[in-house]
Amino acid sequence: MLKGAVNEMVSDNYNTAIVKAMSYFLSRQLLIILLAAITSITIFLNRPYRLSTQTKLVNSVIEQASPAKSEFEDSSAVLATYKTTAAFEQYKPKYVAATIDPSNYGDRYSVDVYGNPANNQPIVVLHETTASARSAINTFRTPNYRDSDQVSYHALIALDGTIVYLVPAEKRAFGAGNSAFKSSLGTETVKTNPDLPSSVNNFAYHISLETPLDGRGKSNHQYHSGYTDSQYKSLAWLLALSNIPDERITTHKAVDRSGNRSDPRSFNFDKFFQILHAYRQQA
Ligand SMILES: [Zn+2]
């Protein structure tokens, strides 16, 4: 009986050791995933505009490409290039990475279904969750095997400003079916699936804001009290890391062609751009 008790104690200690080792291992894994997510978003968001390899350390973990002399300096093409500010350095958002089901995202295509090159410069498409952040993440964790059911964002910003990285930036998230972006270049849209309408997904980075409590369960076209200051700051912080120009930051409502999407409702672009411009300036 004593032997049994001792064995139990030994086994308890052993189990505790295993639990400790596992949680240490998992926390390391999570950190690695997080670093990978942050690195990939930074690289993607700077993709077409990134003209040099000069880097600087931001928040001790984020390497951000900062543009030097543009090779297009003499061309008429206007390529926006930005640098982050002291205000950016001071804001420290919380961020986490969540794994979602691989059926809900895919690879970005280099050619469309007709064989034409798909080389649009990136855009940012803003959304709102319309439900809680947790319920949105659960939706993305559910396998969806029908192409038309698949849905995801690259990142989500919770009411408290926490940034949740969901899909690596180099992957194609399914945030806006049947959509097109109107720019100075014309109407930009890419057809990558013969059975579905063309969309902006191939060159979009989708970010969703968690809907406030008074906006949940309401019909698509009603307004609500809007987003928190922390959400605006975290969104601006995230995009200050990119070289995506202001005019390529848009909404689901603006790119939608189905007539059913009006998100993000009650989004204050003036307020957002004011913070973004405080966090990044033309280099
Ligand atoms: Zn949306």
Image: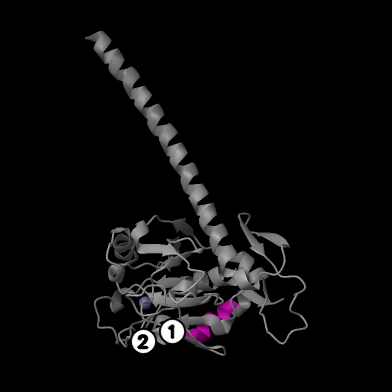
Q: Residues within 10 Å of mark 2 (few under 14, many from 20)?
A: some
> Where is 142 relative to 274, above or below?
above
**Number of numbered discs visible in the structure rendering:** 2
Q: Amino acid at mark 1?
A: Ala
- Camera-side residue: 83 or 182? 182
Q: Residue at x 52, y 80 (%)?
A: 249
- Camera-side residue: 200 or 165? 200
Residue 91 at x, y = what percent?
57, 66
Side (left or right) of 203 relative to 64: left
Inspect this view and state whether residue 39 appears: yes
Q: Quadrant of the N terminus?
A: top left
Span highlighted in magenta in the image: 267-276
Which quadrant of the figure has residue 172?
bottom left
Report which residue position mark 1 lands on: 180
Q: Amino acid at mark 2?
A: Arg
Q: Are marks 2 and 1 in contact (CB under 8 Å)?
A: yes
Q: Residues within 10 Å of mark 1 (few under 14, many from 20)?
A: many
Report which residue position mark 2 lands on: 257
Instruction: Assign the magenta stretch its main secondary structure.
Output: helix
The CA distance from mark 2 to mark 1 is 7 Å
Q: Could you tell me which secondary element the residue under label 1 belongs to?
A: loop
Inspect this view and state whether residue 154 appears: no
Side (left or right) of 89 relative to 118: right
Q: Is residue 275 magenta?
A: yes
